[in-house]
Amino acid sequence: MGLNVTQKIIQSHLVDGQMLPGSPISIRIDQTLTQDATGTMAYLQFEALGLDRVKTDLSVSYVDHNMLQAGFENADDHRFLQSIAARYGIYFSRPGNGICHQVHLERFSKPGGTLLGSDSHTPTSGGAGMLAIGAGGLDIALAMGGMPFNMNMPQVVGVKLTGNLQPFVSAKDIILEVLRRKTVKGGVGKVFEYFGPGIRSLTAPARSTITNMGAELGATTSVFPSDDITLAYLKAQGREADWRELLPDADASYDEVLEIDLDQLEPLIACPHSPDNVKTVREVAGTPVAQVAIGSCTNSSYTDLMTVAGMMRGRSVAPGVSLGVSPGSRQVMEMIIRDGGMLDIVGSGSRLLESACGPCIGMGFAPPTGGVSIRSFNRNFQGRSGTRDGQVYLASPETCAAAALTGVITDPRDLGIEVPGVQSPEQYVVDDRMIVVPPAPEEAARVEVVRGPNIAKLPQGQPAPDVLAGHNLLKVGDNITTDHIMPAGAKVLPLRSNLPAISQFVFSMVDETFPIRAKELGGGFIVGGHNYGQGSSREHAALAPMYLGVRAVLVKSFARIHLANLINFGILPITFVDEADYDQLEQGDQLAVDIRGLSVGGQLLVVNQTRNVEIRVLPQIGSQRDLELIRSGGALAWASQRMSA
Ligand code: F3S
């Protein structure tokens, strides 16, 4: 039977496993990317592997998230990232060069290749026919070390596009329609692959708007075929040699098919506070708007911004509206300056923001109290804009520009103006001076990594002893979140590359004395109730307890991602066979568990030496690999052993 594009890329990168939906596979990774907020830890983890140079075809470190230099921390991080990139053979995209996903699409995306990025919108490069997946920093570190990426074989949802986009309807409206139908939970374990005659009306950057926001479906990734439109884009970027054709076979099939008739599609908008709360723009037209923000990794290509410029030309931003525009990359910025679009935008009364993430993560340009902000971005969760009660809507650049002109939510078709009709450039301005090429291995070996006071080396996990013994350091109840374990916030976030400092905040919301006790007692156990570790995928919620010496977590049940993180960092996750045994354990009890018999699916005994009782437990070990990770002291130690073997 014929293969679709997703299956073709996976097949050509398959290291282990079978291509049956849901079954575990591992794939070879060609390229990696990091951004600064996640990159510092990913590179510290890579460094802990003890390798001399990355083993990928290409790895790029971008700086686009934390651009505010109100103190030394971010500036130090940028310097660290630049020097560690040079040391290990990684390209470095300097602050100001643009948002990682936009720049990667422009300068590095390669049809048919695999890309793993420590940012959830890595699927942007799927618009150029790559299988581009977002993952945690540790996964990126391992991929840079040449290890394959493990996941379950995804189901492939074919999204068939027919017809043609009508005036003032654009790529953003397509992905909003998919979100309307499938919701933010509808993509878990799936890849969304676009096909059909309608894809011919979409340029590579427009396709990337769709694959970018596919992340909001919870999907593994989204992908387009690589065709003559992809070729035209890469040619215009001076990268014709990177193109290869990649189409689904004529008899390819999909696990599910979704059809969208572009002729019938109209301007859509995601209302507060979820990207799937989608209505037609006309349904909410007339709502007063305080702020409009155009940019982000979703919608700030040359065509997006020249379309906005064409709509603003000779017109003015409504008096009650603050409009901010951030070009997605320096390339886009240079070109809209060259082609006069910048003058139209600034001349209309817009504020010009830096070529970076900025307002998307609440870094400047927050909406006023209770104010409506229309954004061309991809997320509108409550508070993300920086204003807790801000009312954030997500729409196309065209709908954003219409709101900026009228001061109320407006369907751009109702403005009574001509569609600007912007053509894709035949040749982009290519100037890679903001991308620092890593030196050759010999010179790289002499590079000194610059570590400010906020950058601390990562300790290597130690192999597990035969018997895990220690005190019950803390007993907690049900529904402990990763925020309880490792809080975020302005005080803690800048310490993400400083494990000794950030570990002082472990469980600070539950019991402030925990870090001191854990250190004094030389580590031990944590006991908890149901759903332990729910919430975000925050790696530090396992990494920092590991640093404090936590060897095992014994609870009634775990949240899935935190469970995987515990294993990755060498902490044994265990559940009670009989939940009533939770009552047999008190804080301070001396516990021990002999793990020589540790196996997939097997039981063990935890001995409570203080109360002289034995408790039957089930280690949450799902595979041989999990077992090896626990025995080795975590994924980094495991990988270093394999690499040096
Ligand atoms: Fe940056 Fe927002 Fe995209 S934070 S990477 S512009 S989702």
Image: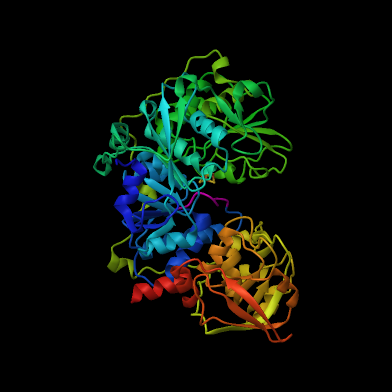
* In the image, farthest residue toward the top: 416
Q: Position of residue 291 (x, y in %)?
A: 64, 32
Q: Quadrant of the C terminus?
A: bottom left
Q: Nearer the viewer, residue 563 or 303?
A: 563
* Tally of marks: 0
Quadrant of res 283: top right
Res. 633 visible in picture: no
Figure check: 360 above or below 476: above
Q: On the picture, is 148 further left or further right than 271?
A: left
Residue 63 among those drawn in magenta = yes
Residue 472 among those drawn in magenta = no
Q: Quadrant of the N terminus?
A: top left
Range of magenta residues? 61-68
Q: Nearer the viewer, residue 311 or 608?
A: 608
Quadrant of res 376: top right
Quadrant of res 5: top left
Q: On the picture, is 150 further left or further right than 595?
A: left
